[in-house]
Amino acid sequence: MKSEFEIAITQLCSDRNLAPEVILEAIEAALISAYKRNYGANQNIDVTLDPHSGQARVFIKKQVVEEVEDDGIEMTLDAARAIRPDAEIGEFVDIEVKPRNFGRIAAQTAKQVIMQRIREAERDSVYLEYADRSGEIVNGVVRNIDSRSQNVTLSLGKAEALLPRSEQIPGEQYRFNQRLRVYVVEVERTGHGPQITVSRTHRGLLRRLLELEVPEIFNGAVEVKAIAREAGSRSKVAVAALQPGVDPVGSCVGMRGVRIQNIVNELSGEKIDVVPWAADVQEFIANALSPAKVVSVYLNEEEKTAKVVVPDRSLSLAIGREGQNARLAAKLTGWRIDIRSETEAAEEAERLAAEALEAAQRAEAREEARRAAAELLAAAEAGLEDEDIELEAGDLPVDAWAPEEALESEETRPEDEAVEASEAEDAPLAGEAAVAEGEDVEYAKEAEEAQATAPAEEDEPELAAPEGWEAPPPVFEEEDDEEEERRRSRDKKGRQRILEYDERLGRVVARKKRKPSRRGAWEDDEDWS
């Protein structure tokens, strides 16, 4: 027969849904607090409670020392061996005490400690229970609706859950004592107990409802592959059969749509499209756009985009209201979907073909122009090399060695017209280029000074040539030839000329560059004129 103490403990455990050990530990902690309240807080107290009779035994732990400084926590070796013969220095000895009566304050303290421990045990029990149920469906009853934040508090029986405004289905109205099925999103431990956050918009709610309503999904014959949901409006579910001979879509819909209709009613009229899943991406995308019919699907693996062609009459159906059908299909498949009608696709194909043909023609024309330019450039370079060879051989008479500007003015080739135009604009700079020829200027000044300082010679009368005398042919002095050769060499070194093909003019032109000074180096960034 149970004692009154056992009956009380059993009743308390049943009401609080706690284990008997938790209640006994709470009572022991309460007795320790009450004893310290009466006999000193610095003492080391231990209490053992008999679970059958409820009798409590109180022990004081004291340390064995050579010299006692505090009687409440220390004792001598002789006193310790009187209680326990094998006691040694440094050990702790339990001394049983029998408190006669607790005061009113001590009893009140024990009661408060017991209630506090029981509440903490309840909170821990609730937290452990719902922490394991995260990601599951629970049933709750509406207990409170905040008028300001519109947050709803649900009673789950042993705990309360919070349904935030962001997790509520748009347009759904709640009333007091209304029963709801919610999805447990998160469970947090707080000082006031577990904080449970639930949702009505999470796609996991739709998955769990399908498991409850469709036995094939619960048993594993049909698997839910993907879910795309816009709560309160429309959802798409992709399912696949794991066993041969099972229709995944028909299993979810049920006979006359009974199974899926129960889920629709639970979600306040939310439309649910169940489509078959396929390993082939093109087929899966075509199924995801249901109820629209798809003509063809073109994939871009790198950008993970798909171009879908549908009949003209199905274009609006494939896109959906405000693009909802296409948006849900993109979420379901994970691909970016571009939907075109057959007419638009044909027009785009023609435009792309025309652009490709035009690009090919332009490329061919550019290639032909490059080949012609290469031929002209090769011919011009060959002629230039022949001219350089003739000049080096010295075949031309001395009178032919005219400044390059004079030759170019007399014989202007078609390819040099662009160069002459640019040189005409730079005519004011010709004086600066002449000054750059330092040695020529100095030589000219010295010749003028020598002529000015030389004494004037008297004009001698010209002698008449005898009859029958013929003037000898002019003899060119070697010094004049050398001077002319040096001048030409300086002009040649001070200028450079290249031939290149001008795409704007469509012909080969010659471009020149002049050296800044005789001793200066060529500037790499100087433009060719």
Image: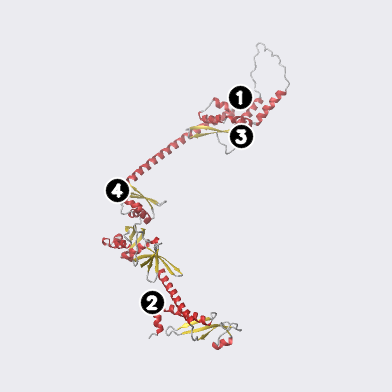
x, y percent for residue 181: 35, 65
SS assignment at label 2: helix
Disc 2 marks which residue?
15
Q: Nearer the viewer, mark 1 or mark 2?
A: 2
The mark that comes first in sequence, 2 or 3, is 2
The mark that comes first in sequence, 1 or 3, is 1
Q: Nearer the viewer, mark 2 or mark 4?
A: 2
* Mark 4, other Cα within 10 Å: few <14 / some 14–19 / many ≥20: few
Examine the rendering and report whether any part of residue 245 can be seen: no
Q: Nearer the viewer, mark 1 or mark 4?
A: 4
Q: Is residue 153 above or below residue 462?
A: below
In the picture provided, is 37 more to the left or to the right than 228? right
| Number of disc labels | 4
Label 2, label 3: how far apart the Cα atoms are: 107 Å
* Mark linked to residue 516: 3
SS assignment at label 3: loop
Amino acid type for the residue under numbered disc 4:
Arg
Is 436 in front, or is 190?
A: 190
Disc 1 marks which residue?
398
* Mark 3, other Cα within 10 Å: few <14 / some 14–19 / many ≥20: some
Disc 4 marks which residue?
313
